[in-house]
Image (tube, rainbow, N blue to C red):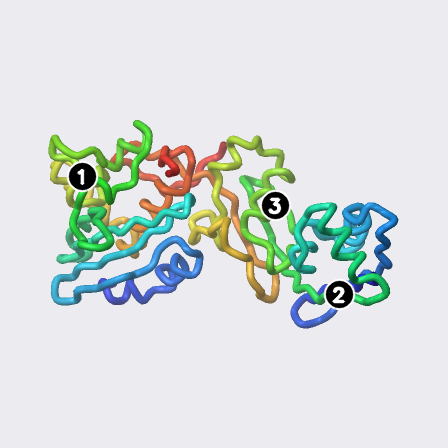
Amino acid sequence: MRLRIEVEESNVVVAKAEREVSVNERVSDALAVVAAELDSEREALLKEIGVRDDEAELTKFFSEGAGKEHSVRVRRVCIDLHFESVSAMRRFLSNETWADVHKWGCRHFHVAVDACANLELRDGSPTGPALNDRTKIGPFSGCKTVWMVKPGPEPNGEEMWDSVRI
Amino acid sequence: MGLSEDINSAEFQHGVTQGFWELVLQERDKDLLYVRLHAPDERNYMVRLQCDMYGTQPIDGRFVDPVNLLCVASAWPQGNSMFEQWIKFKEGNGNLFICWDQDRGGIAQHPDWHARSAWKKSSNQLISYLDFLRQLLWLPARGYTHQ
């Protein structure tokens, strides 16, 4: 099957990847190459293609489509992720969830798994509204500023809103 | 800001679109709101918010049964001892209240908190309250027990 993926940002196609995916190769490896070309995550691309991340299922999907072309256009958005005094820009597919941003942020900023679970994403500023890990990022133009923060301790009756360093 | 403005605020709508909460019922004559809170374990909790004297007095929040709207222990989220600092979910001994300095029930238990007027610190009292509950349910360190 010939797989063609176009990446769109702000209604403009900014990247393309095309590859003949043969069932004679490990399909997940082939998709990883495509994902790397597009600077995306393989898992995120699979969601867009509409196939589960399972080697047997991938092989079935691509063997059934042998000789055909499968075209997907995906939307990508820019996130400017801040954590403490550092920040990093990264593009995510709009169908990815905030959990994907959260996980990437923890990996990128070397946050331990346990600590990561108690950080939350906030829109625009450290005290902006919270973003739900379960919700899709969704489309927007420009680069969205997101803060990854640890809410302060809250013994009952104490102030909880200050974000603190971990 | 009044209660209606805060319900119609971008912050309240943001919580709805993010899947944290939704307004189920509003009894305008009593300034009473019923808000469904979504927890990370796919459970929902209905909280009744008594908002009379909004702005000048704290909100009185109680979890209620989503069907009969009665405040019963089974309607309350449960958790470990950390969680129980704030959410008094065990029946008896005057429990079933939210022990926080922005909650009327909590202040009734700790009258010295009233002088703090903590509920006046936020520009949106309703969001401050809902975001507090959201964090209790969603941050593992707060100790909510997934069912």
User: Separation of disc 3 and disc 1 at Cα?
Assistant: 43 Å
Number of marks present in the image shown: 3
Q: Are marks 2 and 3 on the same chain?
A: yes
Three-letter amino acid code of the residue under disc 3 = Ser
Res. A87 mark? 3
Report the residue at 61% width, 60% height from top. A94
Decide if residue A149 is on the left or right side of residue B72.
right
Residue type marked 1:
Leu
Q: Which residue is mark 1?
A: B96
Q: Secondary structure at mark 3?
A: strand
Is A13 positioned to the left or the right of B41 in the image? right
**Image position, residue A131 (x, y; %):** 47, 52
Q: Residue at x 36, y 42 (%)?
A: B137
Residue closer to the observer: A11 or A28: A28
Q: Quadrant of the N terminus of chain A?
A: bottom right
In the image, residue A122 lies at what x, y percent? Answer: 47, 50
Q: Label 2: few (<14), some or many (≥20) within 10 Å?
A: some
Counting from the top left corner in percent of width and height, residue A72 is at 72, 66
Q: Is B1 left, or right, of A13 in this rendering?
A: left
Q: Which residue is located at x 13 percent, y 32 percent?
A: B92
The chain under label 1 reads: B
